Image: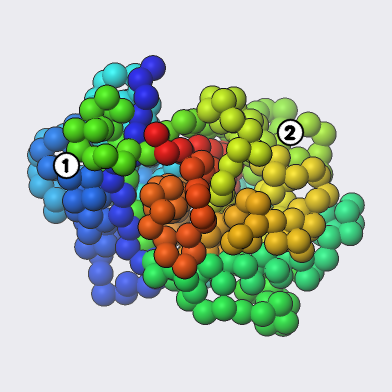
Amino acid sequence: MRDVAVIGVDMIRFGRYEDKSVEDLATAPVIGALRDAGVPWKDVEAAYVAHEYQGLAAGQRILAGVGASGLPITNIENACSAGATAFREAYLMIALGRYDVVLALGCEKMARGLIQQLPDDTWRTLGTDLIPAQFALLARRHMHEYGTTREQFAKVAVKAHKFGALNPYAQYRKEVTVEEVIGSRMVSDPITLLMCCPTGDGAAAALLCSMDKARQYTGRPIKVAASALNSTTYSEGIGSQNFGTCLREGPSLITVSAREAYEQAGLGPEDLDLVELHDAFATAELIHYEELDLCRAGEGGRLIDEGVVDLGGKIPVNPSGGLLAKGHPLGATGVAQIVEIVWQLRGVCGDRQVKGAKVGLAEVAGTAGVNATHILLNS
């Protein structure tokens, strides 16, 4: 397989754009990524467009605004992992030699309130399958098993909002305190409102290219060192998010994907300079530390207490502000994580810059049991 690079990225600030269509929102970062890479639209050979709720042929509708060039456009729905899946498909098509230049685009406009889910088994209407309840149950079990505290979960949200205040692309740009997080409205004990990611609108784009051709366009290609995508098995229960290595026998889905990515890249968690992970809830981030092998089971609280995952720590996590502050427009999230990693590896993130960043990991998990993990590095 051929080496693949990211040569151009862009995104819009996540938030609420009541007066704009998804076509309006998503065209801008495509044009921005093309300009960033110095690539004319006519050179793009294929596009993969991720979204969840944008209707029939959204990719075709959006890219017609850039130019109806006749390129093959594939629309991708894969829960919260949709954007990362679009990126992976673009990567694979180049790595396998089918194309040289491919666009990965993630976009979404979302309704207010809880993330919409399709109807399922009758028992799910009892409320235990609502996403906040799932993460609340995981948090309660973690607290029981390891003595993790509300304050430690709250510190995750505090860190996210501190980073978000430094990120002009974040939906929320205001710092909060531990007391404010714990005192915000209860959603599903121990999860409070400020421990939950906001829904909203957003779009992000990445332009990928074969490494041998990348230097025709840019002197700063970022190598895609690993791309892993996995789903749950029958034995684990179809529809299970399968979180919580620390709470079950054997590795979780997130751990399986992470270890596959580490093996592909020839690296380990100790080699990472930063991580963008799927912090849909503050409780999830702390558990994901353990699932990504950043620490042993039960030690997630220590990492947040000791500042290991903060800016200036050994392994900063979610310097973008993560989903908690940057926002979580589903189809856009996975690509936006890649955008942040690329910017960090280029060293252009200003006050939230991770000094000397050379290797970054992006991880995003989707409801119903899907996980995508990518590792990028300076080539």
Q: Earlier along the polypeptide chain: callout 2 or callout 1?
A: 1
Specify the amino acid type for callout 2: Pro
Whether residue 262 sits left or right of residue 350 in the image: it is: right
Q: Position of residue 356 (x, y in %)?
A: 50, 50
Nearest the camera: 171 or 117? 171
Q: What residue is shown at x 67% (from left), y 80% (from top)?
A: 177
Q: Quadrant of residue 296?
A: top right
Label 2 CA crowd tier, 10 Å (few <14, some 14–19, many 20+): some
Label 1 CA crowd tier, 10 Å (few <14, some 14–19, many 20+): some
Disc 2, SS: loop
Is residue 181 at all visible to an observer of this figure? yes
Is residue 82 at all visible to an observer of this figure? no
Nearest to viewer (mark 2 / mark 1): 1
Location of residue 36 with respect to 112 vertically, above or below: above
Q: How many tags in the picture?
A: 2
Residue that numbered label 1 is attached to: 39
Location of residue 267 with respect to 35 vertically, above or below: above
Q: Position of residue 19 (x, y in %)?
A: 26, 74
Disc 1, SS: loop
Q: Quadrant of residue 311?
A: bottom right
Q: What residue is shown at x 57% (from left), y 72% (from top)?
A: 162
Disc 2 versus disc 1: distance between alpha carbons? 42 Å
Q: What residue is shown at x 24% (from left), y 33% (from top)?
A: 215
Q: What residue is shown at x 57% (from left), y 25% (from top)?
A: 266
Residue that numbered label 2 is attached to: 251
Nearest the camera: 28 or 308? 308
Whether residue 183 sits left or right of residue 364 in the image: it is: right
Specify the amino acid type for callout 1: Val
